[in-house]
Amino acid sequence: MPPTKDVDKNATDHLVEKYIEENDVMIFSKTWCPYCTKIKNALKSAKIEFYSIELDKMAEGDDIQEALIKKTEQETVPNIFIKQQHIGGCDKTLAALKSGRVAALLSPPEPEAKHQKLEDDALDSYDYDLIVIGGGSGGLACSKEAQSFGKKVCVLDFVKPTPIGTTWGLGGTCVNVGCIPKKLMHQAALIGEYAQDATDYGWAQLEQARQHNWSKMIESIQMYIRSLNFKYRVDLRSKGVVYENSYGEFVSPHRLKITDKKGQSKEITGEKIVVAVGGRPKYPDIEGDKQYGITSDDLFSLKYDPGKTIVVGASYVALECAGFLHGIGREVQVFVRSILLRGFDQQMASKIGDYMSAIGIKFSHQTVPIRLECLEEGKPGKLRLHYRQTLESGEVKESYEDCNTVLFAIGREACTNELHMDKIGFDLKKANGYKIKTREEQSTQIPWLYAIGDCIDDETMPPGQPLELTPVAIQAGQLLARRLFSDSSLKMNYYNVATTVFTPIEYGAIGYSEEDALSKFGEENIDIFHSEFVPLEWSICHHREQVKNMSYCKLIVEKKTDRVIGFHVLAPNAGEITQGYAVGMRLGATKADFDMTVGIHPTCSENITTLSVTKSSGESATQEGC
């Protein structure tokens, strides 16, 4: 981010120091410099965030460069600082990347948390063979699988209300405030698009009658979710798993204090304990955020129409919510701090942004909120979000935008911070979102403690692609129970896990992103086959004229083995398309296997079996005809 304004803003030396102090990775750059571009690309490939200013585009650029020369004795750009330490130019920074110095500066090693043997580390007997803390997808799957081996199992689940009082039933994020209501609202938006398509398909007056009732949609979705909550409770009871609607916290090894919604407490013990508490959305820690803002935890059961909405964030949650809100006719603006869909293929992320912009969703880039205030009470009321934006020129401006609802979707933190894990000798760090460091996939340094799902620290998971996905948590939970209570040794495999982002045009992915493939295999060792195409269903729809050519797919292929290592598709129904190809990817499908697969005509998926144009060829990827 740019330095904040202060009384010394005209002092160039002070300005330089502010840039260096307020940004972990600070690049003083010029737009025409190839070495500046080179190091920026290298940092992007390494997924390292940086802030840069272009001195040749700034009125005070020459003064800043003079101040840098005085400070560093370096006369060229790029001039790079990391954690306030001067690194140097492009070559020195590349060397620091290769040696690990950059990583060490950005993530200094923490002393490994050591499990301290406590007096009651082992008990003579236990109330349960297994206690699972968390009744989400992973926790329920683990508990039921453990019970199938004849074990005595208890599940704890308790939802602390959001700042505006939202709560929900058994089943975790996916069922209540995640995948299920998100997909249903995505479908509501698609139906609105189909109504617009209707005229070109010969249907009269459907578009004119296109009106959306927020309250009716919420009522239908919540009725369905409550039916799932009930089924989960019945399923646990029928399988003999004890369900406690209580909040659990450690008091000593193997021992938990559990407290229900009436404040009544008791203690229980478990020979083995699995933490499966998932995560909750973060707030930006600005004035008024929790008092007036909401998150996805609130949106899916919101009893009033949100009206004009500002979505703060560029995660998949942010873009999905912005997409369906726009699709049902609400005005939406998205505040983006840095890049869209961090961790996903950036070409695909850029295409999603282009599509969403083309259909009328406004994006404000390099924008961070600084204060939220209420102008008028109501449901919805009228809010004013103050923000700071960095323009392409490097200039920083502060302004505000009025709206009815502000939705924060800036990331999540694990719900572990109030488990009192220090009571069992386990140290949690705010720096990694209070996530649990594991080894051997789900085990920890405490021999009777395990963790699954979204509360696991990605960095300590096995090599592959750890993903915060419901099916991943379910399979990990089932496999853990089998390893604990049977002779199974099968572990969760995180390679080639398929996923889909349900933005207005869906994005499905398996395997490596293009950035990761280039970093791991090298540009000379991969081919990227790609195609732009028009979904047949869109070809006669006039209202889709601006976006009908935006569907796209690509396969990333390792030249040496011909193996497909990355699969990416941007198209209607991408989720359904991607799931089928995941089987082939897991089995090591080659480009020749894709080529020999006869496509189903005319479908979007068919395009993936006919890819012949590579990026390196420079030929047009636009498909013509059938």
Image: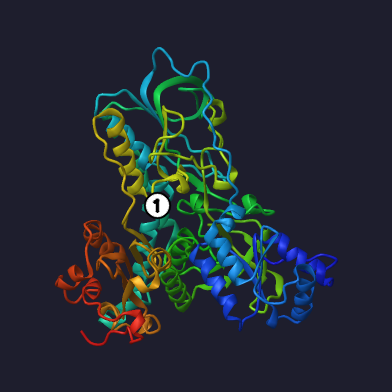
Q: Amino acid at mark 1?
A: Leu
Query: Percent x, y for residue 530?
Result: 31, 77
Q: Is residue 400 left or right of residue 127?
A: right
User: Which quadrant holds residue 504?
Assistant: bottom left
Q: Is residue 498 left or right of residue 290?
A: left
Query: Percent x, y for residue 172?
Result: 41, 42
Q: Which residue position holds label 1?
A: 467
Q: Residue furthest top?
A: 124
Q: Is residue 574 left or right of residue 457?
A: left
| Quarter containing the C terminus | bottom left
Please, is residue 442 above or below residue 153 in the view? Answer: below
Q: Which one is in front, 111 or 92?
A: 92
| Res 144 seen here | no
Query: Under tag 1, what secondary structure?
Result: loop
User: Which quadrant holds residue 38?
Assistant: bottom right
Query: Percent x, y for residue 507?
Result: 36, 66
Residue density around tag 1, few if under 14, some if 14–19, many if 20 or more, within 10 Å: some
Q: Is residue 122 left or right of residue 378?
A: left
Residue drawn at the location 76% of the way across and 81% of the way down:
62
Q: Which one is in front, 484 or 292?
A: 484
Q: Which one is in front, 424 or 259?
A: 424
- The way the protein has been coloured in the rendering is rainbow
